[in-house]
Image: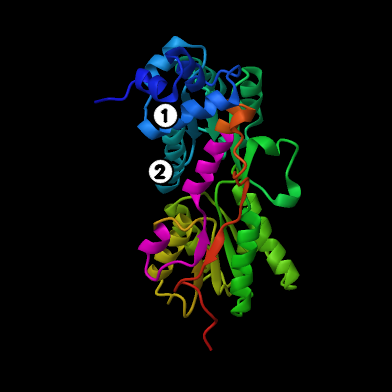
Amino acid sequence: MKVTINDVAKLAGVSMKTVSRVINNEPSVRKKTFDQVMSAVKELNYQPNLAARNLAGTSSFTIGLVYDNPNAYYVIDMQNGVLSRCRKEGYELVIHPCSYNDENMVDEFQTMIKRSRLAGLVLTPPLSEQADIIALLEEMDVEFVRILSGRPDQLGEDERNCIYVNDYAASYEITEHLIRHGHRRIAFLCGDEEHKSTSERLAGYQAALQDSKIPFDEALIYRGNYSFESGVQGAKSLLAADNPLNITAIMGGNDEIAAGALFAARLMNIAIPEQLSITGFEDSPFSRQTWPKLTTAHQENDVISQHAARLLFSKTRGPRNLDKEIMTVFTPSMVVRESSGGIAN
């Protein structure tokens, strides 16, 4: 039989109204009573009727995940991370794709928030970097958490609302890995310029070159987007026979780009890694579906988004539910596979 609010009240030794106040996170409940009720909820595995809760009170028990990213693997990982936390907290999740370039995007945001009666939002790049969206959410008094590319030494005043991914450090480590293997002519295939991750990954690459006293060469940079096709076009352009750049390694801005570059190199009869090393970023399934498999940076998107949701819930549920185990800075770790190696003699 389905567990009811009456069952929780009996086990906790309180009234149904008190259980309702605890579940709705009303601030006037004493901590001892709150803990008592939540213990009963956990023991009985009570699942509140979310639709009824949303209709009955002023509080909403739905949060939103908003994204504009063509990488399906990235979106699914982000979705799974937020959803896993929603289930633990007893919230529903609304997933809302947006177009970064849509001139009506801000109006669309406003309509979506009002229609869905959201308690808060998790924003992913590049939407999390949009000043007009942030201003709208603050004006509407909607809680939000932003997932951003950033470095620990450059965090802004708004860090309490953010989960940062240190793309710079991970890109530096990959570049350093290639340099240690003797590479000096390392090309970089960029993703979409509106993503801060693009500039951060490029900056990490440049810093590693500088620290190894290797001159930066703009001719080795291909400015494209986060797609397989962009990787193909970038590699073809930089490796063309009439374009003697003497490239021995290519860094892809993400795994899709790197997979495209590897595909192009194969078409040009270039041996990987004997004649050309190729690396990716994010450790998506693309990195394991190529041959050889890609050296990359492992980015735990599901864990990152789960912590973003935890941070959001710590804000929407008040000081009593402050989650002290939230990580706010993640640094992708390098995974060395067969696509990178030393320069053949």
Q: Pointer 2: what residue?
A: 76
Disc 1 crowd rating (10 Å Cα; few below 14, some 14-19, many 20+) is many
Mark closer to the observer (2, 1): 1
Residue under label 1, please give it. Answer: 41
Which kind of residue does numbered mark 1 sit on? Answer: Val
Q: Which mark is residue 316?
A: none
Residue 341 in the image: above or below residue 164: below
Is 273 placed left or right of 214 in the picture? left
The three-letter amino acid code for the residue at tag 2 is: Ile
Residue ID at (54%, 18%): 110
Number of marks drawn: 2
- Disc with the residue nearer the chain's start (2 vs 1): 1
The reply to whether residue 187 is visible in this rendering is yes
Judged from the image, the secondary structure of the residue bearing numbered disc 1 is helix
Q: Which residue corresponds to the image point at 37% horizontal and 69% vertical from the top-left?
A: 291
Front position in the image: 16 or 280? 16
Other-residue count near label 2 (Cα within 10 Å), few / some / many at <14 / 14–19 / ≥20: few
Tell me the magenta residue range: 286-312
Residue 253, given in percent of the width and then of the height, sits at: 54, 56
Horizontal placement of 131 versus 83: left or right? right
